[in-house]
Image (cartoon, grey):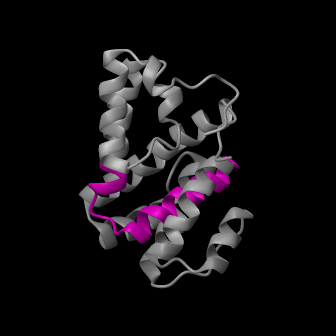
Amino acid sequence: MQSRIELPSADAMSPQQRAIHESILATRGNADGPFLAWLHSPGLAGPAQQLGAFCRYGTRLTTLESELLILIVAAHFRCVGEQQIHEPIAIQAGLAEQAVVTLREGGWADLEPPRLAMLQTLTRQLLADNRIDDATFEAARQALGTQTLVEVVGIIGYYSLVAMTLNAFEMRLP
């Protein structure tokens, strides 16, 4: 990752940093994203990477649904690093390339099935207004159930932290 701060190298990491780094690699296969910045604070890096692993791999959402949420967050924060990492994953999961471009440009993607469209509405409302209106909330609760709705909000929050980290330190793929 390119960054405006120096990112720790594997050979210069403390044992605590190295253990977290190894956990990141075991879960994701690489340390792209905010992880190397977070390793400057192992107390933040450890719990944050565990939450991220759950948000990415442990929720009841499909990969396509999760990646949709992530791309909407990335567009909201104009986070190039997050887009670079997650656009290919979203396309591989089945999100149309035109939808990816539309989201990157800040537009509303034409999404089917209706569950994806509802997730787009919910995510945009929460990011723009810091709230979800009653109609959208009820539609989401009916479609998703309470557990999955809580997980959706968690994904939006977690990837907002990721976007802020990547933007603050101007982190992106070379």
- Residue at 58% x, 64% y is 87
Determine if the magenta segment contains residue 59: yes
- Residue reaching furthest to the front: 11
- Residue at 62% x, 56% y is 83
The magenta segment is 54-79
Q: Is residue 57 left or right of residue 98?
A: left
- Residue at 28% x, 57% y is 59
Residue 35 % position (x, y): 47, 34
Determine if the magenta segment contains residue 92: no
Q: Is residue 55 left or right of residue 97?
A: left
Q: Give the number of marks.
A: 0
When asked about the image quadrant of residue 137, the answer is: bottom left
- Residue reaching furthest to the right: 105
**Is residue 70 placed above or below 89 in the rendered structure?**
above
Residue 124 % position (x, y): 58, 59
146 or 89: which is nearer to us? 89
- Residue reaching furthest to the top: 14
**Is residue 96 placed above or below 39 in the rendered structure?**
below
When asked about the image quadrant of residue 102, the answer is: bottom right
Pick the quarter of the image with the N terminus.
top right
**Is residue 15 placed above or below 136 in the rendered structure?**
above
Residue 29 % position (x, y): 38, 49
By secondary structure, the bulk of the magenta-drawn segment is best described as: helix
